[in-house]
Image (spheres, rainbow, N blue to C red):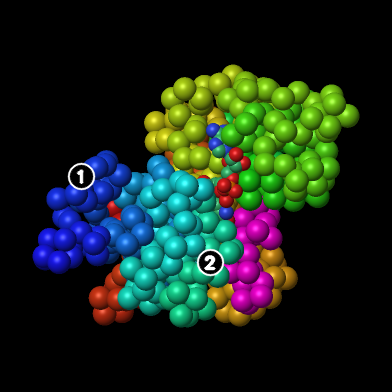
Amino acid sequence: MNNQNRVNKLNLYSPSSTPSPFQKDPSAMEPYKCSEMDEWGPEKILQVYDPDTGMKGVLVIDNTATGPGKGGIRFAESVTPSEVFRLARTMTWKCASAGLPFGGAKGGIIANPNKVNKVEWIKSFAKMIKPYCPTQYIAATDVGTTELDMAVFAHEIGDMHSCTGKPQELGGIPHELGTTGYGVSVALRTTIDFLKEIKRKEIKTSKPLTNLYNEVDTKNRELKVVIQGFGNVGSFTAKFLNEINIKVIGVSDVSGFLYHNQGLDIPQLMNDMREKDKLSELSDIQKKHNYNILDKDEIFDVDADIFIPAALTGVINDNTASRLLDHNVKIIVEAANIPTTQTADQYLIDNGMLIIPDFLANSGGVIGSFVEYQGRTEKEAFDLIQYKITNNVRNALYNSIRMDDSQTESSNVDVRRAAMEISKQIVYRAMLLRKGAINVAREAYARKERVIY
Ligand code: NAD
């Protein structure tokens, strides 16, 4: 047998016949934009590709001054390095505002998890980023990943501290217990209590807030909530709001918007959804209660007091913001990460909307992760979430009405900016300490000065 025949028989690799996946689809792995780097980070951007499995992924470690970067692994076709960076940055502020010894990071795997061998891809991603876990990166679940993926990830890294959100059998406190949704419900309840308190104590504040607490006070339990997204975060938010008698009148998912202006039967809905994938498949409950099933985007077109985005990034934007105002929405509690675009955020604040930002409202998951990391119990996780989110939301609300000393009847309340200032001070002091500038950091802390700007 001549050499060429032997090669053909063994079916060996021929470079010319196997095009690179990047040549096939260059957009699937767009490079990270260095223009996004600033005084906070990101410290590391790792773009990985495994030619054996085809796995493409990104790890962004944004800032580790307060501890190893913490953040979930998002598994979706739409993942880009830029998106992973923005999510990692949100984690930097979230961990700082929650006072946890973690920094900010995020992972991303670029594919539809239902169209690839998920276990192989998670293993492959874990193998690629292993040198950084858990010293600089501690993973968790995110959109497209579950507790089962965390089990595979932890075993591949060979360290149970490499991720949180693991199954209970591995000492985990899975996000599937609803820690994030519980935190969102605590954030909303704290906001309502705060509005009542400033009325009771007659604290001087701006006009929109005055209107808002008058509404809240007179309506009390009649407040109506709609939730976009009925996955892990949205469904548990609904469950825990229902338990504290806050009425959920509508929930949406990718298939539609289930709505009844007198409120939905949330326990039954949660129960029915155990056997279904989509809200549009729930014909029994619809018929029994006479619920409407509308187009998913009609969630922006019904009268409600509170809107909770718990699905995608950027859904509150130039097209949808004014629809929320037109339908009397007064409070937005951001359960999803980065659901509001910058321009919509400013427009809504200018028009008197009270927005509880994502990194405060959805920090229940990462607080639960911290408890898991310490090897403590589920009960301790729920207790700590309640304690921290109540304090953090109250602090941010107080700071937001104090921030502008010249508050007039027309000024507005920017809770995101107030909460961000608190987080930035914490991270900046940690960065000074890392540099060895301990005296500067202590002085700044003692004076509680604004160290930035
Ligand atoms: P999930 O995949 O469990 O649920 C997402 C839900 O959104 C599903 O019900 C889906 O049908 C729905 N959805 C998708 N597109 C939609 C659309 N166009 N309109 C309406 N609904 C739509 O995800 P999750 O874990 O609940 O996460 C939701 C959001 O919360 C994400 O932004 C995530 O980053 C953020 N978050 C999650 C956690 C957590 O612990 N899971 C923690 C913090 C933040």
Q: Nearer the viewer, residue 107 or 452?
A: 107
Measured as percent of width and height from the top left, residue 46 is found at 28, 61
Indicate which quadrant contains ligand 1.
top right
**Towards the viewer: 185 or 49:** 49
Query: Mark 1 = which residue?
Result: 23
Farthest-out residue, right: 288
The residue depicted at 83 percent of the width and 33 percent of the height is: 285
Q: Is residue 179 magenta?
A: yes
Residue ranking furthest to the front: 1
Q: Is residue 223 magenta?
A: no
Tell me what residue is drawn at x 80 percent, y 47 percent.
271
- Report whether 323 appears left or right of 193: left
Is residue 346 shown to the viewer in this render?
no
Where is residue 401 drawn, in percent x and y?
A: 53, 44
Question: What amino acid is labelled 2 in the image?
Answer: Met
Q: Residue at x 40, y 54 (%)?
A: 109
* Amino acid at dot 1: Gln
Quick check: 289 left or right of 216?
right
Q: In the drawing, what numbered circle is on residue 435?
A: none
Q: Which residue is mark 2?
A: 150
Q: Earlier in the sequence, mark 1 or mark 2?
A: 1
Q: Residue at image x 85%, y 26%? A: 287
Q: Position of residue 253 (x, y in %)?
A: 62, 36
202 relative to 57, above or below: above
Q: Quadrant of residue 208?
A: top right
Q: Which residue range is magenta in the image?
A: 165-182
